[in-house]
Image (tube, rainbow, N blue to C red):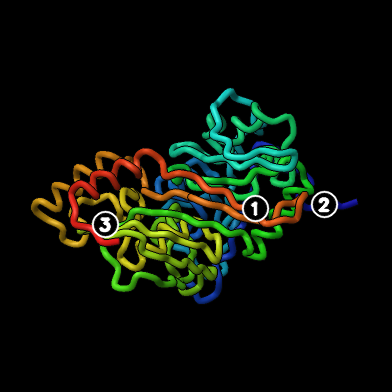
Amino acid sequence: MPPQESSVEQPEEHEQLRILVPPGEHRKRLDVYLTHRVENATRNKVQQAIEAGMVLVNGKSVKSSYLLNPLDVIDITFPRPPRMDATPEDIPLDIVHEDASLLIVNKPAGMVTHPAYNNYTGTLVNALLYHCNHLSTLNTEMRPGIVHRLDKDTTGLMVVAKTDAVHAFLARQFAKRTIDREYWAIVWGRFKSPKGTIDANLGRSKRDRKKVAVTEDGKSAITEYEVLKEFEYLSLVRLHLKTGRTHQIRVHLAHINHPVFGDPTYGGRSNTWNGLEGKKAKSAANLLKLISRQALHAKTIGFIHPETKQFVKFDSSLPDDMKEVLKQLEEEGPQQN
């Protein structure tokens, strides 16, 4: 019998990606093309992979400066990190509610939701495994119980499933967008209208793959906002998500020139925002010292309980850093309710 193609399997510690350069594509350097094409890639990492012989074009090793042609075939070999199982860790949890089906946890700033590459410990999942004997397994071994997530430096309420049936029941509500989620944020500027809707598609930024951006070809994303208090150059707003995209609130607010105060990724950490100067800029700089993250908190969450089939809603207080910023703002004045 003739030898079969691909008879030698790729070792478990590696995985392959094949990219076909589409017809009509303008000629680009290989490293530039892959930096924009491969998610979470940086040009430096791409160049290192090319130099290590982990990138082939039409089956041959080439330099980073190689100019790609339409219909070129790029094969990339990625080193796969060793498999790691999430382990229990005795980390304190702020549990707002717990029953036989689920938990409502108030996640602090700085805590990652679940383990990932280069970040296997100190996560919410590690704490949950220590606290609970059973968690749902529908979201892989590294994400037991996790039905949804919050960004590392966003605080607030999360629902955690203890069984697969409960997980599926809650996930359907998220998919149907019937989960009631309310966020509070301190944002830059004062709004022209006390209420509004931000409807702008979101996708990966073409300039920086680690960021999200408003893009015409992105996924639908809708955020509703309501101004609760206005100060001289900051506002406290309440937000409702109609969709649940990555970084949705932060990107949407930055898109309308009201970035979340303190947000280092989406333009919220400059004390000279929008031309602020003098005493205002100095005041803003002092306020930024009070909070090292985006001033965003998932304040409430409501859903149909999987066992009682009744609507339940849970609330949480603002974290101390946001409270301190608001306290300082109220002392400075002026403000409007």
Q: Secondary structure at mark 2?
A: loop
Residue at the spot 43% in from the left edge and 67% down from the top edge: 214
Identify the residue at the far left of this view.
278
Residue at image mark 3: 234
Q: Rounded to the nearest whole Å, what is the CA distance between mark 1 and mark 2?
A: 58 Å
| Position above or below: 216 against 140 | below
Q: Secondary structure at mark 3?
A: strand
Q: Amino acid at mark 3?
A: Leu
User: Does residue 254 show up?
Assistant: yes
Which tag, 2 or 3, sits closer to the chain's start? 2
Q: Amino acid at mark 1?
A: Val
Q: In the rendered structure, find residue 4 and report the number of the disc placed on it.
A: 2
- Could you tell which of marks 1 and 2 lies nearer the N-terminus? 2
Residue 24 higher or lower than 334, as above or below: below
**Which mark, residue 312?**
1
* Quarter of the image with the C terminus in it: bottom left
